[in-house]
Image (cartoon, coloured by chain):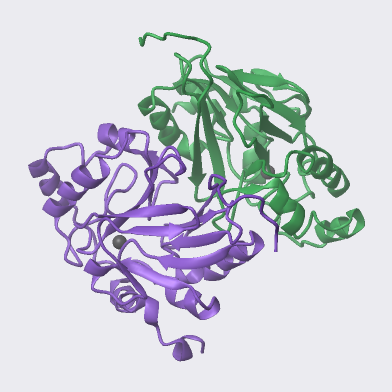
Chain colours: A purple, B green
Amino acid sequence: GSYTTSSQSSPVLLFRQLFEKESSTYTYLLADFSHPDKPALLIDPVDKTVDRDLSLVRELGLKLIYAMNTHVHADHVTGTGLIKGKVPGVKSVISKASGSKADVFVEPGDKICFGNLFLEVRATPGHTMGCVTYVTGDGPDQPQPRMAFTGDALLIRGCGRTDFQGGSSQQLYKSVHSQIFTLPKETLLYPAHDYKGFTVTTVGEEMLYNPRLTKDEETFKGIMQNLNLPYPKMIDVAVPANMVCGLQDLGSKAS
Amino acid sequence: GSYTTSSQSSPVLLFRQLFEKESSTYTYLLADFSHPDKPALLIDPVDKTVDRDLSLVRELGLKLIYAMNTHVHADHVTGTGLIKGKVPGVKSVISKASGSKADVFVEPGDKICFGNLFLEVRATPGHTMGCVTYVTGDGPDQPQPRMAFTGDALLIRGCGRTDFQGGSSQQLYKSVHSQIFTLPKETLLYPAHDYKGFTVTTVGEEMLYNPRLTKDEETFKGIMQNLNLPYPKMIDVAVPANMVCGLQDLGSKAS
Ligand SMILES: [Fe+2]
Ligand SMILES: [Fe+2]
């Protein structure tokens, strides 16, 4: 136990970006490092890298409280179920609109607090019907510039596909333009995936250089219709598993 | 041309971490974004990702002035030669101790300026005889916390091998302890490689959790002697190419 002279000090964000090579997924670790408990959350953890993520949490002395998903992933199995089994008390979080199981369901406008920091929930459907973007708080004590965790709604110079899981190119276009491109231009955008080795972008950059979302809506819809992508390799395993992400049967999982 | 009311404003660091999957190499882009010219440098660019890196430089409106290496790499071909061919005026930078060719040779204590920001050169031999660590400046207008680009001297929870290129485990131990672990504990450490999906660490973290460099010197030397690593796959191609990194024959390169 450390002695704290004031509980009023400004929060200090501890932030780590973590990469899972096979599915090219980014997992994000955020914590209020100035809070005595160092409360922390993970966004989009992957089952294969749960041990890596949890040792980092342990080494940094953090208290993991939430294991969150931006959406029901089709390309990897979420780590939230395993995490709940390994760290008692962690709550799984996903959007109510995802139709998936979890401990905490979030809706647009909700705030997810960790210490004196918080994330704001924005609905960004279109890649899946339940996609949300988590955005760091707006306020004097919150990180500047703001940071948005966009899942597969907006990727760096790209976006997620819209042909499965209740996807809709029209909806995705509206989501990105109304919920992401309206953030301050310097907002840092952290996607769930990158396939070219980029780690971050900004609202300003994507508004200028995103090859899909800078187009008008009709052109965008045409692009998304003609991607000719293969059937998602992992979808038949990943989606059923991820639909129950927060509540996997730990007995059978542990074996 | 933008009109600037004051040339005295504090510099703003633009920073991007970029990943090359095949060799698991991190390339770093740094620029003084508040300077009218937006002068920029790349640390450890890879030949295969030069086009990606240069389009990012172009899109961000930066003026690339330096293409730098932390050391003569044995696992990939540096991008500096290609960059010099594509962006006239860029100068290649490497340590004098590397014995390699380049436009600018740096020595311990040298400052590499870009706009109102600078990097300080620290000698960290042991992985190769010419390894240096580039550290952001110490001063009121320089980034806080400081950032150190450690090459292969210190990796996240690891370090580079010491059995080739004039390597020495004794020297590496001394380099890390005297040149890196003496930086403030919150200093962010950015390595040239990571194989587990980590992106950054800190001096404080490595002083506590680096499985090799927290040991005493004799134990460390024993660990390094018994790694039983395979012969470096790319060494016979990469090292000769990288020894002339700044001065490749552009005629033959372009074909
Ligand atoms: Fe997805
Ligand atoms: Fe190396």
Residue A47's place in the image compared with B223, above or below, is below
Residue A74's place in the image compared with A145, above or below, is below
Residue B78's place in the image compared with A3, above or below, is above
- Residue A185, image x, y percentages: 32, 33
State whether residue A232 appears in this view: yes
Residue B239's place in the image compared with A168, above or below, is above
- Residue B132, image x, y percentages: 73, 33
Examine the image and state in which quarter residue B129 appears.
top right
State whether residue A225 appears in this view: no
Frontmost residue, A159 versus B138: B138
Frontmost residue, B87 versus A220: A220
Left/right placement of residue A174 relative to residue B212 reads left
Q: In the rendered image, which quarter contains the C terminus of chain B?
A: top left
Q: Which residue is rendered at x = 14% and y = 53% of the image?
A: A171
- Residue A139, image x, y percentages: 40, 42
Left/right placement of residue A214 relative to residue A71 reads left
Residue at the extreme right: B218
Examine the image and state in which quarter residue A146 appears.
top left
- Residue A74, image x, y percentages: 30, 68
Residue at the extreme left: A218
Q: In the rendered image, which quarter contains the N terminus of chain B?
A: top left
Ligand 1 located in image quadrant: bottom left
Q: Which residue is rendered at x = 30% and y = 76% of the image?
A: A243
Left/right placement of residue A122 relative to residue B47 reads left
Frontmost residue, B147 versus B17: B147
